[in-house]
Amino acid sequence: MNSIGDDCNELKKQYDACFNNWFSERFLKGETDDSVCAPIFKVYQECVKRAMREQKIELREIESDYTTASEFDNNNSATGSSGKPQGSQNKS
């Protein structure tokens, strides 16, 4: 899959290669320090942000369409598994 900006495609390939190598050669062997790919990720991230600005895509517009797992968990804990507020009893 290509990056959002054509200028970012090569950076994406470099980051993907770094990540895949880190994942298979380090993470799966118990090493969780992912800082080895941080420099290329930072450069790639800046390129993507620049491409988004050029295409007039605002990240907050995208983020507002999704609910995170923690938000989902918080909503369910407030209503309980029945979807009704906890503490209320169904008197039918």
Image: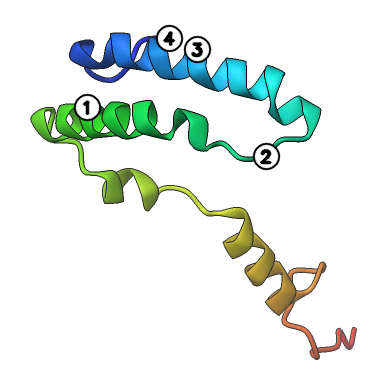
Near mark 2 (Cα within 10 A), the count class, few <14, some 14-19 or many ≥20, is few
The kind of residue tagged 2 is: Thr
The CA span between labels 2 and 1 is 26 Å
Residue position marked by numbered label 1 in the rendering: 47
**Residue 24: % across, % down:** 70, 18
The residue at 31%/16% (across/down) is 11
The kind of residue tagged 1 is: Cys
The CA span between labels 3 and 1 is 17 Å
Residue position marked by numbered label 3 in the rendering: 17
**Which mark is drawn over residue 1?**
4
Near mark 4 (Cα within 10 A), the count class, few <14, some 14-19 or many ≥20, is few
**Which mark is drawn over residue 32?**
2
Identify the image quadrant of residue 33.
Answer: top right
Residue placed farthest to the left in the image? 54
In the rendered picture of this protein, how many numbered marks are placed on residues?
A: 4
In this picture, residue 88 sits left or right of residue 65: right
Q: Which one is earlier in the sequence, the residue at label 4 or at label 2?
A: 4
